[in-house]
């Protein structure tokens, strides 16, 4: 059977397809109303990314074991396990992922462009300290202005929950992405 997830096509076993369909359905029901489609799109993109990683080892068909590993790794938005079966817990403990840390502009906590708040989140330090450093560089030699402009132009904005997780260096799983959804809708 061929399915499309996260904009990619995969050949998948029927039992793996049913398991993935159940996982996504359970995931949708556990999301709060204000989180909706943005988190689901990010989860599907992350599933597609993990499937591509696992299929890179010569395997061409997505198996049930592969789907079980991925769903155990991603978890649920409320942090509760989807199943109480010990097998899924063991898979989750086995497969820990080193989160990727990338520099983005933090548009939620910005004063001007999000450069200082993005650097503060990336380096995990107080944003006030970064702002004082930029102010000192601006007053002292004018270099702070050009550095700020260059970072503002080069660094992308952290718009999706997955990008907000990457900015802070935390794993882009369901629970963490649910923390960064837009609650103003």
Image (cartoon, rainbow, N blue to C red):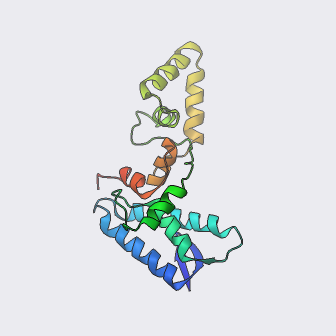
| In the image, residue 157 above or below residue 148 | below
| In the image, residue 116 above or below residue 1 | above
* Residue sitting at the far right: 58
Counting from the top left corner in percent of width and height, residue 70 is at 51, 65
Counting from the top left corner in percent of width and height, residue 17 is at 49, 80
Res. 7 visible in picture: no
* Residue sitting at the far front: 86
| In the image, residue 109 above or below residue 184 | above
Q: Quadrant of the N terminus?
A: bottom right
Which quarter of the picture shows residue 55?
Answer: bottom right
Looking at the picture, tell me which residue is in the foreground, 111 or 12: 12
Name the residue: 47% across, 36% down: 121
Q: Quadrant of the C terminus?
A: bottom left
Which quarter of the picture shows residue 21?
Answer: bottom left
Counting from the top left corner in percent of width and height, residue 184 is at 29, 52
| In the image, residue 13 above or below residue 37 | below
- 167 sits to left or right of 24: right
Name the residue: 47% across, 29% down: 125
Name the residue: 51% across, 20% down: 133
Name the residue: 56% across, 23% down: 144
């Amino acid at each position: 059977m061929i399915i499309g997830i996260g904009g990619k096509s995969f050949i998948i076993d029927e039992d793996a397809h049913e398991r993935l369909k159940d996982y996504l359905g359970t995931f949708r029901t556990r999301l709060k109303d204000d989180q909706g489609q943005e988190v689901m799109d990010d989860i599907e993109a992350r599933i597609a990314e993990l499937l591509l990683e696992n299929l890179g080892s010569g395997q061409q068909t997505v198996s049930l074991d592969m789907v079980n590993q991925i769903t155990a790794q991603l978890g649920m938005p409320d942090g509760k396990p989807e199943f109480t079966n010990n097998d899924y817990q063991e898979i989750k403990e086995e497969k820990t992922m080193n989160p990727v840390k990338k520099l983005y502009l933090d548009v939620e906590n910005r004063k001007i462009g999000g450069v200082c708040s993005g650097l503060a989140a990336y380096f995990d330090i107080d944003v006030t300290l970064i702002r004082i450093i930029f102010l000192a560089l601006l007053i002292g030699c004018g270099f702070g202005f050009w550095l700020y402009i260059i970072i503002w132009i080069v660094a992308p904005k952290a718009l999706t929950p997955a990008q907000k997780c990457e900015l802070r260096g935390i794993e882009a799983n369901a629970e963490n992405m649910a923390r960064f959804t837009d609650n103003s809708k």
